Amino acid sequence: MLETTVVIIGGGATGTGTLRDLSMRGIPAILLEQGGIAHGTSSRFHGLLHSGARYVVNDNESARECIEENMIVRRIGRQCVEQTEGFFALTPQDDPSYVEKFIDGCRTAGIDAQEIEVAEALRLEPHLSPEVRRVFRVPDSCVDGFRLVLHNAMSAQRYGGRMFTYHEATGITLRNGQVCGVTAVNRHTGETVEIACQCVVNAAGSWSGHIAGMAGLDVSLSPDRGTLIVFNHRFTSRVINRLHPSGDGDIFVPHGSITILGTTSAATDKPDDTTPTTEEVLRLLDIGEPLFPQVHQYRILRAFAGTRPLYTPGGTSGRKASRNFHIVDHADEGLEGMVSIFGGKLTTYRLMAERVADRVCAKLGQCVPCKTADEPLVHDVDEATLKRAARFFPMQGLHLMADRLGDDLPGVLELAEKQPNNPLLCECEMVSMAEIEYVARQPAIFSLTDIRLRTRLGMGTCQGAFCSLRTVGALTEHGVQLELTPTDNVRRFLQERWGGLRFALWGMQAREMELSRAIYASTLNLDGAEHEQDC
């Protein structure tokens, strides 16, 4: 049996942030995640680091938290954030009287919102509708959710935190009204793991209600499903928001080489209800048209959906439900040693983790201050290392690669130096052979999908059509064995990509899907007889 002080259930931004916080305070902790890194909501959102301006009219407290945490995450997570700034644009379909409420709300929350001339906004964003009436500049930014979770985990592990991915919590052990352990199952081996502990933090996002139920608790948590669209190019350099009360499809976020439009809001009873529909895609395009009139003509790469964990005491739901976070100490219900965190936003993940860690420390009788706002998640790479890396990695992707790798950079560089060459396997996202091989050899990596979550392999414009084939061939050549056969690995990887493509299959997207299908039918016989595969 393993022993620790705190078990955290849930490996998203809040869970890994809590692991980091407790580890930095010197409190032993183990995190359990049922899937790979950023398996849930933290990888299924629009990638916006809120300035808070979206909430200034209806929830000024949330807006204030957002702008404060926005500035902290920019500082400690520089490698995860692109400081784009954002526009709030009033379209002819929006109520002009909302503008004064917006200005007052920004002033109250401490958000710097500056109006600029429409002509200047159109000069900066030439694809924006010329019909917009007023434009305000705010400190919105973009954040890579995958990388933010990974870098929090790296920081936590530097302080002794332990993280078990693909370990599903299956039971919480109680004794005389006190939590004393957690049972988990390794989803790859089926092995049962028992962990003795003094406290459990339930940070399982949309699965939090299920986890609370294991301890005999009944909480008011409603998963809310949101669908988003990914376009194949970056037609805006800034986050573009509709200047109106929060609604569906009113945010465009540039992200690397692509743009994301989101999101919808619909109640669901399944935390893993992440299947979008063609109707939602078409509706989002219609809603997005007042900001970008040509949006129907842009090529869609894929659509995806995620579920938000909304805390809904009193029966509120959808956009009426609070986006604030709520910390519940279940000692109030007669169960000592269990704390849950519900709701919230990725932008405020660090604050949420700090508040949960404060509560845990109070229960343990510890008095150690939080340090997570002061220390960077990963350290900047020195010039000497970058100069050394420039001999093996393409210059145009050097800083992108270094920011992505964080603590893994020295190991990847050492591997690259031992090889005769280091070709790019994923050209869309500039991922090289050394990076993929290094990640593939990690014990927590089982599939091409795991490699994708760590490196962004296959997340660019080809959606894995070319790079998945190159990668599985290169790994086989280098003697790296994953859990599945090469053919089954590629099939599962492509099937996951297909899950986001089929809701937007028309025009160029349909043609490119057929090209991808032909590539794999002719090279790996994926649509042929089983006995002819892996020959």
Image (tube, rainbow, N blue to C red):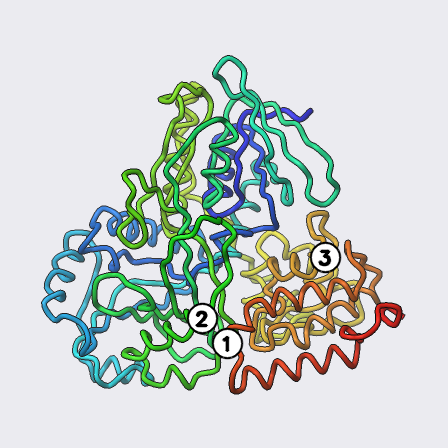
Q: Can residue 378 be spotted in the picture? A: no
At label 3, counting other C-alpha atoms closer than 10 Å, the crowd grade (few under 14, some 14-19, many 20 or more) is many
Contact between labelled residues 2 and 1, with CB atoms less than 8 Å apart: yes
The residue at which mark 1 appears reads as 504
At label 2, counting other C-alpha atoms closer than 10 Å, the crowd grade (few under 14, some 14-19, many 20 or more) is many
Q: Earlier in the sequence, mark 1 or mark 2?
A: 2
The residue at which mark 2 appears reads as 229
Q: Residue at x 61, y 23 (%)?
A: 196
Q: Is residue 378 left or right of residue 89?
A: right
Q: Is residue 438 left or right of residue 430?
A: right
The answer for how far apart the CA atoms under marks 3 and 1 are is: 31 Å
Task: Using the image, determine if residue 441 lies above or below residue 31.
Answer: below
Q: Quadrant of residue 363?
A: top left
User: Helix, strand or loop at disc 1?
Assistant: helix
The picture places residue 66, in percent across and down from the top left corner, at 30, 51
Residues 213 and 71: in front is 213
The picture places residue 438, in percent across and down from the top left corner, at 71, 57
At label 1, counting other C-alpha atoms closer than 10 Å, the crowd grade (few under 14, some 14-19, many 20 or more) is many
Select label 3 or label 1 by which is in front: 1
Residues 422 and 382: in front is 422
Disc number for residue 90: none
Q: How many marks?
A: 3
The picture places residue 133, in percent across and down from the top left corner, at 17, 79
The residue at which mark 3 appears reads as 440
The answer for how far apart the CA atoms under marks 2 and 3 are is: 29 Å
